Amino acid sequence: MADASFLMVTCQRGAETALKNDLTAAAGWRLAFSRPGFVTFKHDSPTADWPDSPFARTRSHSVGKAQSDQLAELLDRFDGVLDGLADRHPGGFDHLHVWARDRAVVGEFSFEPHAANPLVADVAQRIYQHLTAGGRVAASEPNQTASRGQSVLDVVLVDPGQWWFGWHRAEDLPSSWPGAIPPVDAEQDVVSRAYFKLAEAVAWSQLPMRPGEHVFEIGSAPGGACQRLLELGFRVTGIDPAEMDPRVLEHRHMTHVQAHAEDLKRSVYRDARWLVVDATIKPQKTLWAVEGIVTSSEVSVRGMLLTLKLGSYERAEEIEQWTQRVRSWGYPRIAVRQLATGRREICLAASK
């Protein structure tokens, strides 16, 4: 193991092929192990840079695995793995993150990655108690959000009685969250699940959006994303021919334009500083509609969050074309990610 690099990655179920294509395109990386929602890779160099992909929800140095129906045996195996890391991490780790690979496709069979999982919480607590007894984890609880630069010990529950071990250093917000899943209360009363998607998109993208600025959302009905934007203190205009939820419309900073975006004069968008689009249409139509808005001399949009529906993962090969098109509009800072709260789609964040 000292003479090679091993990388373990979790992703949304169904995205494995797109993920493998992205990561094995990087020189020297090859597939090692694959299960729906969980893939590992190997490189012969111990210092190889990690490849990236918008479909990689988490990335960790893979350091071993254990399989048993006995908790004590799993913990013993984990101890052996940690002994092998003692030279590299003599002071232990700052955090312990424990999560399970997605048990279903997001949105199917009512599955949501951010929903509470009592089994995972119980296993995490048992592992944590075992590790803190040996002084190997500094955090006061398992599955806390890490700070940038902190070391994180990772345990992925791949199958019943099968644990994979790894570690990573928190470099951005998603890598600070356990399983790169935003810490939101899935049981709160929201207008629609778009609330959770927008919350994750704003946090992940780190766009310099300030309370009080005007955000336009295209495809806003019934209003889940608008609900979150209003909570964050923005002035919001939702554009959609369908009806909006009354709980959103009653907010004093909410305006609903009941129309199709392409039917509106460009002057309607004159006050827009940020644009959010999550419409159930093909990516080409989304990009066509957005291009007509942001390239108008009457409009000065600083940045945008675009949801681009894939339909099929075979369309993943078009993502680079989409990003180049957005960049040509004068938005050089672009990031693309399949959100944990999203479905078969990617979120494109762009700013000037």
Image (spheres, helix red, strand yellow):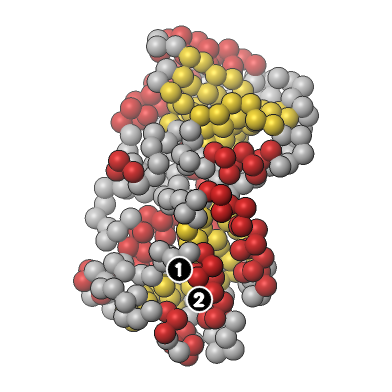
Residue type, label 2: Ala
Would you say residue 146 is visible in this rendering? no
Query: Which residue is depicted at the point 65% across and 58% down?
Result: 320
Q: Quarter of the image holding residue 28?
A: top right
Q: Visible in this render: residue 342? A: yes
Direction from residue 235 to residue 208 in the image, left or right: right
Q: Residue at x 31, y 31 (%)?
A: 118
Task: Please identify the residue farthest to the left as the structure is shown.
Answer: 246
The residue labelled by disc 1 is 277
Alpha carbons under labels 2 and 1: distance apart: 10 Å
User: Which dot, 2 or 1, sits closer to the camera?
Assistant: 2
Contact between labelled residues 1 and 2, with CB atoms less than 8 Å apart:
yes
Q: For mark 1, does the 10 Å Cα neighbourhood hold few (<14), some (14 to 19), or many (20 or more) residues?
A: many
Which residue is pictured at 59% across the width and 20% down the height?
A: 64
| Residue 165 percent across, percent down from the top left | 55, 24
Q: In this view, does 242 lie to the left or right of 49?
A: left
Measured from the top left, where is residue 204 in percent x and y? 52, 55
Q: Residue 122's image quarter?
A: top left
On screen, residue 186 above or below 116: below
Using the image as rendered, state which of residue 134 and residue 225 is in the foreground.
Answer: 225
